[in-house]
Amino acid sequence: MHNLAPRGRLRREELAQQAYLESLLGTAFSKGLIDNAFYERVQLGCMELLAAHCRRYTGGQSTSLPRETAEDIFHAIVFSLGIWLKGYSEPEEALAALGGGTPALQEGLNAGFQKIQIKTRATRQFYRLAQGRLLETDNYVYNATAQGGIAGFFKLYEPRFGAHKIHITADYPLLLFPEGYQGIEFIQLYVQNLDYENRFCRAFPARAIKAAFTRHAIAYDTTVENLHANLCAVALQAALACALCDCPVENLALSFTGRERLAGLLAQKTERMTILSNALEAVLEQVAINKPAANYIRLALRLYAPAMAEEMQLLLE
């Protein structure tokens, strides 16, 4: 393909995983790896795919569809092509594949659909297993998303004409929310991250977890049922506080002397990250969770340590 520069100019980590096709083309164009003609050929190929899918959608009766429906089908095509392109180990290989014209794009679209179907089956199976690790809580937002919402996605998801759609609101806030992801990629990440959080919370006695949630709700003048917060963060903050103050981590509750010590430690704002990271390692040594879940909690702490430290002030009231 004569429009491509030598290999090595594109790096996968600089591409947006949430919008892979668009990012691949945009980055390649900005680096001079492709020209306008290449870009336009891909656009034309996508429009030809759209026309074919519109005919399929209407059963061959007409290609005249409401604009919103046509846009949905187009977004599904772009999303599915992105799934296909991610299968290449190097971005340059994916870029080269795009240069094959409409026939190559059609093959890529079919491959993308197949990958999406595999992802959907695998995620559905994982979700069924993960349901056994859901928290026993009265929290409405958690239950509505973790049970009804995600199950509803699998009932409504139709990759051929709506691969990019999520269908659910996913109102329950995760520590690491899959921002910007679409379709099955969003649900796959959401279910995985939710399971990591559930594994952490279930490493503590159920009574201690419920008490920690209740104390947090009272601090915000509400109930556990109506609390709109990440429950794993509540448990994590309580566990960190206990580790910092040499209180039993499994109790998730501070003694009077523990509160005094915590107040002094939180006052050291410049050292908070180090203090909390050390406390987390002490917590992870005492709880039984797998390595991926532990790494997820570590990443969440790195991102949200300042906010968590402020939240932990509530434990002193």
Image (cartoon, rainbow, N blue to C red):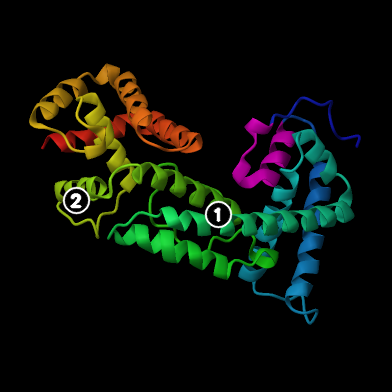
Q: Which amino acid does label 1 sit on?
A: Phe
Q: Horizontal placement of 178 versus 215: left or right?
A: right
Q: Name the residue under label 1.
A: 126
* Region rendered in magenta: 12-30
Mark nearer the N terminus (2 vs 1): 1
Quadrant in the picture for the N terminus: top right
Q: Specify whether residue 135 is in view.
A: yes
The percent coordinates of residue 209 (x first, y second) are 26, 47
Q: Horizontal placement of 119 versus 304: left or right?
A: right
Q: Count of labels shown?
A: 2
Question: Cα distance, mark 2 to mark 1?
Answer: 30 Å
Q: Residue at x 17, y 26 (%)?
A: 262
92 versus 191 height, above or below = above
Magenta span main SS: helix
Quadrant in the picture for the C terminus: top left
199 versus 277 height, above or below = below
Residue toward you, 181 or 286 = 286
The percent coordinates of residue 35 (x first, y second) are 81, 37
Let me know if residue 20 is in the magenta part: yes
140 versus 37 height, above or below = below
Numbered circle sitting on residue 214: 2
The percent coordinates of residue 114 (x first, y second) are 74, 57
